[in-house]
Amino acid sequence: MEALLSRNYEGGIIRLTRPLAPGVSCVNVNDPTFSDLAGVLTGVKPVTYTPCSREKLPGFKALCEKLGLKYLPAEKFAGRNCFHMRRQKEVFFIGRDLKTLKTAALIWKNPSNIDRWSGMLGYPACCVRMHSEWLDTMGHGPDLVEMAFRN
């Protein structure tokens, strides 16, 4: 695995063996994460989200365009601000169509919609239920990883 990473990963960039689309032979490790991007491209995830800095925004938009994906500035559309570890980042939703992105943004706007939001992110119902049970313990119940392992 280490040899594979050293050949295909360098400085926050993954070099792909085969292009995802014309002109897309490498992707950033984050913003969006490769696994989330793959989930949207394969249809496993209706929507994903990513923070993006202003300086990386042109590359992000170009990537979405080359892959035939749509994006929506979540915080501006839904009128909900997020906490950002680093200032100057903005959250974007990514998906195959704008209607789904708008639906996701409206669900995301209300934090009490965690079950519906989890479904928009492609999580199976059993995982959403288990996560809700874990949240109900307010951190005083079993470890989330242990719960998932037993499930």
Image (tube, grey):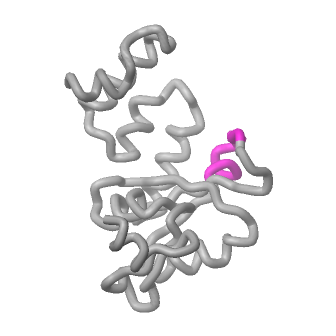
- Residue 93: % across, % down: 53, 56
Residue closer to the observer: 109 or 151: 151
Decide whether residue 76 is among the magenta residues.
yes
Residue 68 in sight: no
Is residue 72 visible to us here? yes
Q: Would you say 10 lies left or right of 81 here?
A: left
Asked if residue 133 lies left or right of residue 24, the reply is left
Classify residue 146 by image quadrant.
top left
Spot the residue most to the bottom.
Answer: 22
Which range is magenta? 74-83
Viewed as shown, does residue 87 lie left or right of 150? right
What residue do we see at 34% from left, 28% from top? 145
Q: Residue furthest left?
A: 151
Residue extending farthest to the front is 3
Check the image and name the residue furthest to the right.
87
Q: Is residue 139 above or below residue 150?
A: above
Q: For the image shown, how many numbered marks are present on the structure? A: 0
x 44%, y 84%: residue: 24
Tell me residue 115's x, y (percent).
40, 30
Relative depth, front residue between 144 and 20? 144
- Rendered position, 148 above or below 101: above
* Residue 135: in magenta span: no
Which residue occupies 37% across, 14% down? Answer: 142
* Image location (x, y in percent) of residue 40: 37, 61
Position of residue 31 measured from the top left corner of the image (x, y, whole percent): 56, 61
Q: Quadrant of the N terminus?
A: bottom left
Point out the image quarter for the C terminus: top left
Rendered position, 40 above or below 23: above
